[in-house]
């Protein structure tokens, strides 16, 4: 690997790239290499994707600076909740956050607390100042590459639910999240009709806002 490409690359990313390069070689034992990759990087996490409703449409109407302010304010409000529930913020892209939790219940409770906090925050705010949050959750075995990224079917499903399907105030989850949620938290799940790649089924979390 060229030295130029190694600069700034974590040990995990470097190891993964070398294994991918080996996998590309003619005659490579892909099954063996795949197992090595899963042995090195396979972990079980709950993945959260958040999105601000109406962001793209609003930028055109109110300008990017206003929405940079909205992103800043949403992060100021939500990141302490993520931290309090032992979530790890891996990525911030535009108005979206990607967060991972070891514990499914903590991810669910963090999601509910985030929505409830924003309900209070939005009181007496004009429509343009309100922060409307959409959340998607997935849970399962993923490839976690250092603190840089995660990959897997539940990651893809959570992203689709949070960024494309969920509406304001909604918390959408994969079937795996539903199955691993502790019944002690006494929440309901209503199946949605949307088909989500990477998940057998998806559900809307029923909670008191």
Image: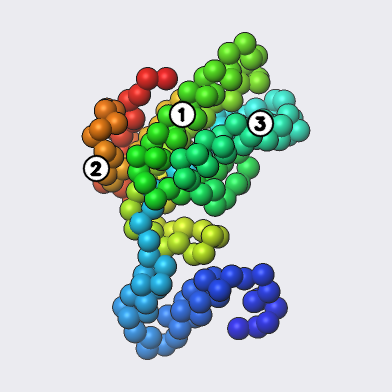
Q: Nearer the viewer, residue 102 or 198?
A: 102
Q: Residue 73 has which mark?
A: 3
Residue 8 visible: yes
Asked where in the image residue 79 lies, by quadrant, the reply is top right
SS at circle 3? helix
Pointer 3 with pointer 2, Cβ within 8 A? no
Q: Could you tell me residue 162's position as x and y percent? A: 45, 38
Going from N to C along the chain, the mark reached first, 1 or 2, is: 1
Residue that lies at the very extreme toward the front in this rendered image: 84
Query: Along the horizontal axis of the image, is 5 left or right of 119?
Result: right
**Residue depicted at x 28% and y 40%:** 181
Give the residue drawn at x 52%, y 19%: 119
Residue 168 vertical position relative to residue 44 in the rendered view, above or below: above
Query: Given the current orientation, which residue lies at the most extreme bottom position?
Result: 27
Name the foreground residue: 57 vs 85: 85
Say whether residue 193 is left or right of residue 145.
Answer: left
Q: Dot 1 corresponds to which residue? A: 113
Task: Give the image location of residue 166, x and y in percent.
Answer: 43, 32
| Residue in the image at 50% along x and 39% along y | 84
Q: Calculate the distance from the C-alpha at mark 3 to the C-alpha at mark 1.
A: 16 Å
Determine which residue is flagged by label 2: 179
Residue 156 drawn at (x, y percent)? 42, 50
Foreground mark, 1 or 2, reads: 1
| Vertical side of 139 occupied by 166: above or below | above
* Residue 61: quadrant of the picture: top right
Q: What element does badge 1 sit on?
A: helix
Q: Is residue 112 left or right of residue 131?
A: left
- Label 1 Cα neighbours within 10 Å, binned few <14 / some 14-19 / many ≥20: some
> What residue do we see at 56% from left, 74% from top?
11
């Amino acid at each position: 690997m060229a030295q130029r490409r190694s600069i700034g690359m974590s040990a995990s990313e470097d190891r993964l790239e070398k294994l991918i390069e080996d996998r590309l070689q003619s005659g490579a034992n892909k099954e063996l290499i795949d197992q090595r990759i899963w042995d090195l990087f396979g972990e079980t996490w709950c993945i959260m994707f958040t999105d601000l409703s109406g962001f793209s449409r609003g930028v055109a109407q109110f300008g990017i600076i206003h929405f940079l302010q909205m992103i800043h304010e949403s992060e100021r409000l939500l990141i302490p909740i993520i931290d309090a529930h032992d979530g790890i913020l891996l990525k911030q892209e535009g108005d979206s956050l990607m967060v991972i939790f070891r514990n499914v219940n903590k991810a669910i409770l963090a999601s509910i607390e985030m929505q409830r906090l924003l309900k209070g925050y939005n009181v007496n705010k004009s429509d343009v100042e309100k922060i409307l949050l959409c959340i998607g959750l997935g849970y399962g075995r993923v490839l976690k590459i250092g603190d840089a990224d995660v990959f897997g079917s539940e990651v893809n499903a959570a992203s689709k639910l949070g960024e494309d399907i969920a509406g304001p105030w909604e918390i959408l989850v994969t079937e795996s999240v539903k199955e691993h949620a502790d019944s002690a938290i006494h929440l309901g799940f209503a199946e949605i009709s949307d088909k989500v790649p990477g998940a057998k089924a998806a559900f809307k979390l029923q909670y008191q806002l």
